[in-house]
Image: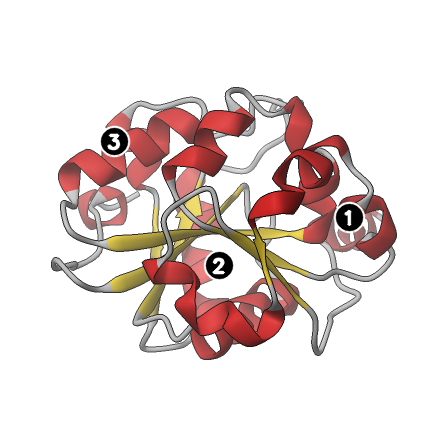
């Protein structure tokens, strides 16, 4: 892994940057599609893919090396406004809440938006300090096949209900005071990292 893989991408006060975190094991077209949706609908300047050293809610024993996952993600992203970084390893943060605190401290004036798939919203209430995350920055939820109803009926979605923006207000999300979130529907991909790993294992 190269030292530049752990650096924060270029940023400046006033930029609207989406943060898309995950193991990216492996990155796939669904990640790219969600990022392009966020760039367009939220009127973001950039999206950062935060490739995590390891998800604390998952078994990481078979996780490929961080540098390998970054290389694959960068090749797949292939977009001038999608930046791939392993900065979380340099920040030495384990949980999302800690990562977001560190980024806000290091990037004053940047208007961050946390991006997650609807499958993650369904289990968001199990994340460490999930309410703190919601109070820290606006959240954009991207619809994913088979998880729409489970996501909007989840404990986290119920707690967040009063702070939900309509989809036609999506462009205002980055400038909104958190808690604030929006559920974006649109073109969806059936691909998942789990499916691709199973496919690879089956040869």
The residue singled out by tag 3 in the image is 102
Alpha carbons under labels 2 and 1: distance apart: 32 Å
**Secondary structure under the numbered disc 1 in the rendered image:** helix
**Secondary structure under the numbered disc 3 in the rendered image:** helix
Location of residue 170 with respect to 60 vertically, above or below: below
Q: Give the percent coordinates (x, y) of residue 199.
A: 82, 55
Q: Which of 43 and 37 is in front in this view?
A: 43
Alpha carbons under labels 1 and 3: distance apart: 29 Å
The residue singled out by tag 1 in the image is 152
Say whether residue 23 is visible.
yes
Q: In which quarter of the image is the N terminus?
A: top left
Mark 1–mark 3 contact, CB under 8 Å?
A: no
The residue sitting at 50% across, 69% down in the picture is: 170
The residue sitting at 54% across, 27% down in the picture is: 130
Q: Earlier in the sequence, mark 1 or mark 3?
A: 3
Left or right of 38, for residue 202: right
Left or right of 61, for residue 129: left
Alpha carbons under labels 2 and 3: distance apart: 26 Å
Location of residue 175 with respect to 154 vertically, above or below: below
Q: Earlier in the sequence, mark 2 or mark 3?
A: 2
Specify the farthest residue to the front: 162
Q: Give the percent coordinates (x, y) of residue 125.
A: 67, 27
The residue singled out by tag 2 in the image is 72
Q: Quick one: label 1, few (<14), some, or many (20+) residues within 10 Å?
A: some
């Amino acid at each position: 892994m190269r030292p530049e893989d752990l650096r924060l991408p270029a940023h400046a006060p006033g930029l609207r940057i989406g943060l898309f975190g995950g193991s990216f094991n492996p990155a796939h077209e669904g990640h790219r599609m969600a990022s392009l949706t966020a760039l367009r609908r939220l009127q973001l300047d950039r999206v950062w893919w935060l490739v995590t050293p390891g998800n604390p809610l998952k078994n990481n024993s078979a996780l490929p090396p961080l540098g390998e996952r970054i290389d694959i993600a960068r090749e797949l992203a292939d977009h001038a406004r999608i930046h791939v970084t392993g900065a979380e390893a340099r920040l030495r943060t384990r949980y999302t809440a800690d990562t977001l605190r560190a980024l806000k401290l290091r990037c004053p004036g940047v208007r961050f938006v946390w991006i997650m798939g609807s499958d993650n919203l369904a289990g968001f209430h199990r994340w460490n300090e999930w309410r703190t995350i919601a109070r820290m920055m606006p959240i954009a939820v991207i619809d994913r096949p088979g998880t729409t109803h489970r996501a909007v009926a989840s404990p986290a979605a119920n707690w967040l209900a009063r702070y939900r923006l309509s989809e036609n207000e999506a462009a205002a999300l980055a400038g909104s005071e958190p808690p604030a979130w929006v559920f974006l529907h649109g073109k969806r991909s059936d691909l998942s990292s789990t499916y691709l790993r199973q496919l690879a294992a089956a040869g």
